[in-house]
Amino acid sequence: MTQHPVFVAGSVFTATVTLGIIFVTQIVCPTQTASLGNKVSEVVSENDSLHRRVQSLKSAADEQRNTIIRLRESYSDLRRRLAEAEYSNLLVSGSPYPVGLGKVKVGDPISLLEKYYPSDRIKYRKDGRKTLYGQSEIFDRVTYYFEVEDGESLITHIVFPLNFDEHFDLGSDQKNEFLLSRLVDSLGQPKDWGDGYYSWECRMGGNVFFEINKRYAHSYIVMQTGFRPAGWPE
């Protein structure tokens, strides 16, 4: 029986479509899916590799920072020990006066400053004090306070400020520890007034007062016997 041309064409179209669907679903799609899967795997692998590299770089940077911190701490400790070694004999034994600064003492006439030290290093202030500059590397700005007594200007107290900044990079606590240690080495154990206040009675006359982080930071004061700084504990 001869089939009508329309039915034949329809059958051919249906077969063609069916073959196309089979080709697409079973050959083209799986191939593209596999290709995309491979590309996704490559991207994921590259991302994992980049992540590991970033983590590695972060670890290396952290290690470098830790190394720098350790080196800075070692450097600071080395400078502190160097300072202690170089200036271990900062004060004359048994004396409150630094080496090279013991010629003019409390109770002396202020005029002795010009006698023993260069006049161009001495600055006069109208409020009853004179400052000696540059006579010592460590105590490079020593201030002498004086009052007129019986027509003569006598030194009542002297302030010795510690200057490490140009020579050694010491922290505030280290400066205090260093200065207190040198005073103890020279004068013995102090009277501890509490709250960072210390004092010594000197055999050669006068008293020494040292305050940690108070008005005279990193300094100590030599005063005439019977006197003490204002605000000192009772």
Image (cartoon, grey):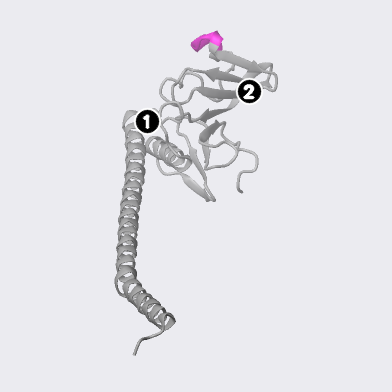
The structure residue drawn at horizontal position 44% and vertical position 40%, both measured from the top left corner, is: 180
> Is residue 78 within the magenta segment?
no
Which residue does the numbered mark 2 point to in the structure image? 146
* Residue at far front of view: 1
159 vs 115, nearest the viewer: 159
Q: Is residue 207 visible?
A: no
The answer to which quarter of the image holds residue 211 is: top right
Residue at left offset 42%, top offset 33%: 169
Q: Secondary structure at mark 2?
A: strand
Left/right placement of residue 28 relative to residue 176 reads left
Range of the magenta residues? 114-120
The amino acid type, in three-letter code, at marker 1 is Ser
Label 2 CA crowd tier, 10 Å (few <14, some 14–19, many 20+)? many
Give the residue type at disc 2: Phe
The answer to whether residue 69 of the structure is visible from this angle is yes
Which dot marks residue 212? Answer: none
Q: Quadrant of the N terminus?
A: bottom left
Q: Which mark is residue 93?
A: 1
Could you tell which of marks 2 and 1 lies nearer the N-terminus? 1
**Above or below: residue 203 compared with residue 11:** above
198 up-or-down from 103: above or below: below
Q: Residue at the location (32% across, 40% down)?
A: 71
Residue 112, position as x, y percentages in the image: 54, 14
Residue 84 lies left or right of residue 133; in this view the side is left
